[in-house]
Amino acid sequence: MLIVVSYDVPDDRRRTRLAHGLKDFGERVQYSVFECRLDKDELEKLSRRVQALIDPEKDRVRIYQFCLSCERQIEILGPGKVMEDPDLYVL
């Protein structure tokens, strides 16, 4: 499923660590937005990783899950495209 993670982290160091951690799961599509293709187990792993990297009192992270029919309705204005499922998975 398509997962979109957006975040607002005021501390530079935590924000950088979070961005590096999210790169393990998907690709950055805007400065504070990542798109990821994950199954349920990977989504749980992502959520645990985010929780370990943020300060829950100061940082805000939103994780959106898109169903297939919702994903087809995403409109992109400007450069870019919705992340596609890779044809090949490397484990």
Image (cartoon, rainbow, N blue to C red):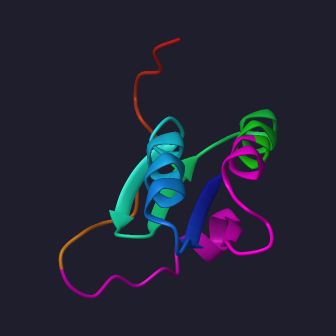
Residue 84 seen by the camera:
no
Vertical comparison of 42 with 10: above or below: above
Please report the residue visible at 47 percent of the width from the left and 21 percent of the height from the top: 89
Residue 69 placement (x, y as % from top left): 65, 72
Please report the residue visible at 68 percent of the width from the left and 57 percent of the height from the top: 54
Would you identify the image quadrant in which residue 25 lies? top right
- Viewer-closest of 55 and 41: 55
Residue 45 placement (x, y as % from top left): 76, 36
Vertical comparison of 6 with 21: above or below: below
Residue 64 placement (x, y as % from top left): 69, 69
Left or right: 7 as drawn, with respect to 42: left
The segment highlighted magenta reads 49-78
Please report the residue visible at 37 percent of the width from the left and 57 percent of the height from the top: 28
Q: Residue furthest left?
A: 79
Q: Residue furthest top?
A: 91
Task: Assess whether residue 27 is covered by the magenta stretch.
Answer: no
Vertical comparison of 71 with 14: above or below: below
Residue 30 placement (x, y as % from top left): 34, 70
Task: Assess whether residue 64 is covered by the magenta stretch.
Answer: yes
